Amino acid sequence: MHRESASVVIVGSGMGGGSLAWGLAQRGIDVLVVERGGFLPREPQNWSPEAVFVQRRYKPSDMWLDDDEREFAPGVHYVVGGNTKVYGSSLPRLRVADFEQTQYPSGTSSAWPFAYADLEPYYQAIEELFNVHGTTGEDPSEPWRSAPYPYPALEHEPYVAETMRRLRAQGLHPSSTAMGIDLRPGGSCIRCSTCDGFPCRLGAKSDAETCALEPARATGHVRILTEAKVERIVADRSVVTAIEGTLHGEPFSIDAGAFVISAGAANSAALLLKSANDHHPAGLGNSTGLVGRNYMVHSNTHIAAVDPRRTNDVVFQKTMAINDFYRDLGDGIPGGTIQLIGKVQGSMMKTHATKVPLTVLNQMAKRSLECLVMSEDLPSPHNRVTVDSRGRIHVSWRRTNYDRHELLLARAKKILRSAGYVGIFEQRFDIALNSHMCGTAVAGLDPTTSVLDPWCRSHEIANLFVVDSSFFPSSGAQNPALTIGAQALRVAAEVDWAAAA
Ligand SMILES: Cc1cc2nc3c(=O)[nH]c(=O)nc-3n(C[C@H](O)[C@H](O)[C@H](O)COP(=O)(O)OP(=O)(O)OC[C@H]3O[C@@H](n4cnc5c(N)ncnc54)[C@H](O)[C@@H]3O)c2cc1C
């Protein structure tokens, strides 16, 4: 049996775990990060659409099950840095109203147990850490900020600039996307076409390994155990005493003062549920039965908009977003965001349009602009993660608030048509495209309606924290990673005190 101990153990090295490790390192705490995956190698395949999207080189073999017991390959990456190793680095803040309750025609988006103002200093800190580039004054939905973006917004390439001109002519306010890439003076980013969805071969993407975990390890306070899958959290009535799992196939046990689960929304919930014992028969911190419930993703649709008269020669496309409809789709009710994504290549389209010849897709990709249309998924107790007796993850999920998504999608198509795009193709995200998942251990003030307190500590177990997207009481309609990181920095002091108690 491999044994270790530390002041704080963090399970998972993704956005939540990596950022927290950095926050604790600044406080001089002895931290051990336990990560089921290894380091993602820098290799030529990092930038190969064939290797990344067709052969799924960096995806695990994990299969989860839906309501009908059908297997699906989830949107997860078990490597140091977690999903951020391949993410699109779009790092916007949530908006002020996202922290408040919002009534939609078909349901309610829950209030958070703290306000935007409470998180704002940590947004600033995480933007510094992740080298976020952006600008203010363009986006009608942007929240207030106490300081400018650390770095100026990315320049739009001529094709995107022309599209923005066409959108502005319609009275819209296209704005720069807040991006985490290393375009600082002397930075290593080369603005290539293989960023969104690909690992960065140059280490120029602001992922959690590069920007948080490596600087944390450099302090000497943070260690990492890789290829170490945590299977069980061992707890008595009021405290966690150890985590157990397998390291390169051998059993391990680690004790610590405080235990932080940062395994991503589904795996964190699964771990709490799998760790049921006599004191906690429904799973750890789960006397309410809420662990695993309120699973949210986002209502997302990819659009490829084709203007046959214009060749899209853009290399780095992901520089613009449209947030005019974020809080009001013209009827006083929020719609969501429309964002450019990384330039899609024909071979990437082929993974979905399997029957269309690659030559046709390549021609189409030369004339298309790709966007993500994203609206809010609402918390519902029926949408949930459970674990079966074989330890397999099951996800029950029905779309929520989809009427708003349909309206936003229709609006997105309308403005794109007015901008000259005659052919618009869509790919609606299904249960497997769940990379923005959140909400499976919601934070709140009331222990009868939430799993965690506002600092991500279990209401029931004093030295147990869940610091990843699980804590989100509602999903908002902006990309989640910056908010996960900001909250991780916010809770670091609380974790430190719990470890010392
Ligand atoms: C293709 C893609 C593009 C994306 N683009 C964006 C974007 O542009 N902007 C944005 O904000 N978000 C984006 N996201 C989503 C973003 O990456 C996630 O929201 C974020 O990484 C979630 O952080 P987390 O800490 O909850 O989980 P993760 O970052 O996934 O980290 C979880 C970690 O826990 C580890 N782990 C899991 N189970 C165990 C276990 N039992 N034992 C030990 N370790 C374990 C995993 O290996 C992983 O390293 C994207 C995601 C994908 C896949």
Image (spheres, grey):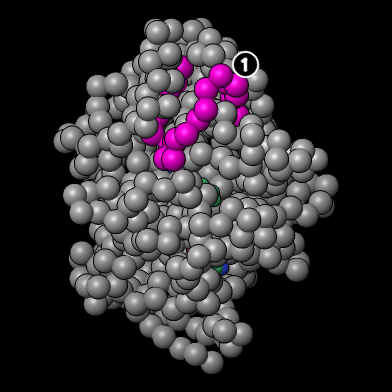
Boundaries of the magenta span: 304-327
Examine the residues drawn in magenta and state their main secondary structure.
Answer: loop
Q: Residue at x 58, y 88 (%)?
A: 250
How crowded pointer 1 is (Cα within 10 Å; few <14, some 14-19, many 20+) is rated as some
Q: Is residue 251 visible?
A: yes
Q: Nearer the viewer, residue 102 or 352?
A: 352
Within the magenta stretch, is there residue 321? yes
For label 1, the residue is 422
Q: Secondary structure at mark 1?
A: loop
- Considering the image in quadrants, where does the C terminus appear? bottom left
Within the magenta stretch, is there residue 161? no
- Residue 436 drawn at (x, y percent): 53, 44
Q: Residue at x 57, y 28 (%)?
A: 367
Q: Residue at x 57, y 33 (%)?
A: 366
- Considering the image in quadrants, where does the N terminus appear? bottom right
Q: Residue at x 22, y 49 (%)?
A: 184
Vertical comparison of 5 with 362: above or below: below
Q: Nearer the viewer, residue 492 or 450?
A: 492
Vertical comparison of 243 with 187: above or below: below
Report the side of 106 relative to 456 (left or right): right
Q: Nearer the viewer, residue 301 or 495?
A: 301
Q: Is residue 118 visible?
A: no
- Amino acid of disc 1: Val
Vertical comparison of 247 with 487: above or below: below
